[in-house]
Amino acid sequence: MRTVAVLSALAAASAVHANPTQTSQQKPRAVSLEPITATGNAFFAGDKRFFVRGVAYQPGGSAADLDPLADPEVCLPDIEKFKDLGLNVVRVYSTDNSKDHKECMDALAEAGIYVALDANNPKYSINRAKPARSYNADYLQSVFATIDEFIKYPNTMAFFSGNEVIHDLANTTLAAPFVKATTRDMRSYIKARGYRKALVGYSAADVSTNRIQTAHYFNCGTEDERSDFFAFNDYSWCDTDYITAGWDKKVEAFTGYGLPIFLSEYGCTTNGRTFGEIEALMSGDMTPVYSGGLMYEYTNETNGFGILRIEGDNKAGEIDLKQTGERVELPEFASLSSAMVAYPAPTGDAGYTKTTNSVACPTQDDHWAVEGTLLPAMPSDAKKYLTEGAGKGPGLKGVGSQDSGTDEVVEAQPGSGEVDAPASSSSSTATSSSAANGRTAMGPVDKAPFVISGIVVFFTLVGAIAL
Ligand SMILES: *[C@@H]1O[C@H](CO)[C@@H](O)[C@H](O)[C@H]1NC(C)=O
Ligand SMILES: *[C@@H]1O[C@H](CO)[C@@H](O)[C@H](O)[C@H]1NC(C)=O
């Protein structure tokens, strides 16, 4: 995308361009941000390389499952804080696709802030314990409705097609084909609906045993099946530096990967939180291969990773995230703000690789259980959404989609598009266990309890150093 050079030159600092016809008498018209595109292994806003300098934003935490972008009384006071922090991206894990988001999205755009959005939510997501069953038309309808709602805002930076669905045990990698199929379907939907080419990719858990296999899996195979970027969570910067944290080894491992990568969560808490991660991410050591990252997280929730407290949040179930819930900055807020000032995004192209490439698919081993490269076909009863649109989204309530499908899998024939998966069962009665699905696993994996087949598993923090 090199066609908007004049506009971007006018708006050099932030890529924001205001409507030039606006006068002081009028209510300011919404400014528009240039959509983020991917070229080679980098992101661009117009012709300017774009680095993610953001935070995770989910006030109330994953348990509350509230959409902060549907209510201006919630988002507006936070957007003021985002401006103070100098952010350009926030990641939101749960949004309600039955609601309107114009006010919050426009206010974010005016502040020069993009949104990296999870297209799933706890009830409508791939469940790693029953991936085939949870990949169905009801699920895709919700995902597509989220795309419909957010793609119209130019400051929707990217959609995550899954969050931490794959974990450290090899059997969780069996969910990977369904997440990759979701990625493929989202990209097909965006194309079929004639939307702008919004970016779609997966956000991987901080898991050393299969990080590279997962990355390779999402960038192997045919163009229609591959992602637009890869993101992963990384909490390894603890009492440490670039070399001790092993980030040099990761840069090496991701050199030549062929797509943009960024950290979808970072922010170890045992290191005084001076956010040396930002210094590294913005340095010449990393910018040829990485495109920034998202600090986890903005509000302080029960796992204690936040940099700001909203009074009333999470107190005995009484959640008051609105303007009345006073925003109290914790000490880390100032630390993050200082680090953002001290370590600005590099100017220029910062040594990115100009061409995109795919990589070889991972082979089966002790840590990667997926056999072959065939993906499940898009469920036949979901195909109508490509031509008719998804219609109204189901929102965050209801029975969800995790039991709407069947355990039968029909593999897609590469390139043919001829073979359909079985139709979703119409009798969907089971309630979903949101704790068992991948995407609710917000935050570091050592803090996230999962219920899988009735057994509570606390994932241990793995691989601070090794890949
Ligand atoms: C994976 O294996 C573990 C341990 O054997 C088991 O507890 C868990 O339910 C399995 N998970 C899946 C997704 O099959
Ligand atoms: C952040 O939340 C955690 C967990 O509720 C709590 O223990 C901690 O005191 C909070 N931090 C601050 C500074 O309020």
Image (cartoon, rainbow, N blue to C red):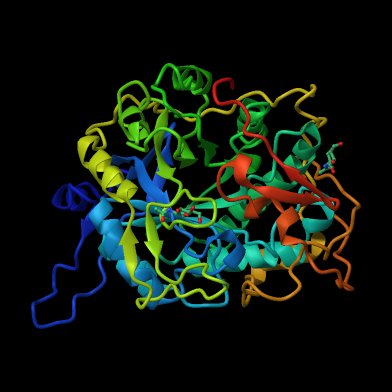
Which residue is depicted at the point 41% across and 32% down? 271
Which residue does the image show at 43% across and 52% down from the upper left?
306
Ligand 1 resides in the quarter of the picture at top right
Image coords of residue 159 (percent x, y): 52, 53
Residue 236 is situated, as x and y percent measured from the top left of the image, at: 50, 29
User: Is residue 83 at least partly visible in the picture?
Assistant: yes
Pick the front one: 384 or 249: 249
**Residue at 46% of width from left, 22% of height from top?**
245
Quarter holding the C terminus is top right
Q: Nearer the viewer, residue 345 or 382?
A: 345
Residue 244 as seen in the image, left or right of residue 65 = left
Relative to 338, does residue 17 appear above or below in the rendering? below
Quadrant housing the N terminus: top left
Whether residue 180 is situated above or below residue 141 in the rendered picture: above
| Residue 109 appears in view | no
Give x and y (percent) for residue 158: 47, 52
- The location of residue 265, given as percent across then percent down, is 49, 43
Q: Is residue 337 above or below residue 72?
A: above
Residue 53 lies in quadrant: top left
